[in-house]
Image (cartoon, grey):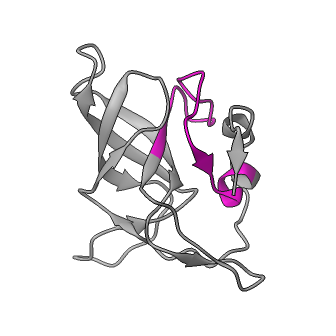
Amino acid sequence: MKAVKAHITRGLQKGSYIPTCDNSGAKELRVISFRGGKGVKGRNMSGGVGDFITASVSVGSPEMRKKVVNAIIVRQHKEYRRSDGIRICFEDNAAVVLKDDKGNPKGTLIKGALAKEVIGRWPAVAKLAKIVV
């Protein structure tokens, strides 16, 4: 996993509900944990754009519901700052469901814009992106 140059404010925490922006069959995810995050005992884990998460499907098709899946956060509502000084925020939070640990997306279509930080870190998701901000 490649490092991100932006200082990403952690806008989502454990237990957050995130809508998906792909056609994998899941509609809404509940964050269980953040992969590769360091924490302090008793503190909730948090993450932002480009982070690899483990989540359970709370709303979706009957075969996807109640399953634990891996996903990547591609948009967050909380604004964050890039290294050139620009501040970026999106209208909503969104995630993309993965089919394996290597970053290959389960769906074949991504709706909406993706952050530039996600494109640099996850090249398999970048192939499906139509709009990059």
Front one among 119 and 37: 119
Q: Is residue 80 above or below residue 69?
A: below
Q: Quadrant of the C terminus?
A: bottom right
Residue 25, quarter of picture: top left
Residue at 66 percent across and 37 percent down: it is 125
Q: Is residue 114 above or below residue 28?
A: below
SS majority, magenta: loop
Residue at 73 percent across and 73 percent down: it is 5
Q: Position of residue 67 (x, y in %)?
A: 28, 27
**Left or right side of 56 for 126:** right
**Left or right side of 66 for 111:** right
Q: Position of residue 111 (x, y in %)?
A: 55, 36
Q: Position of residue 95 (x, y in %)?
A: 46, 45
Report the span colored magenta.
95-119
Q: Is residue 79 above or below residue 19?
A: below
Residue at 28 percent across and 60 percent down: it is 14
Q: Is residue 49 above or below residue 98?
A: below
Q: Is residue 115 located in the magenta-colored stretch of the structure?
A: yes
**Left or right side of 21 for 132:** right
**Left or right side of 85 for 112:** left
Front one among 106 and 92: 92
Q: Residue furthest top?
A: 63
Say how many tags the image has.
0
Q: Position of residue 94 (x, y in %)?
A: 45, 48
Q: Is residue 54 located in the magenta-colored stretch of the structure?
A: no
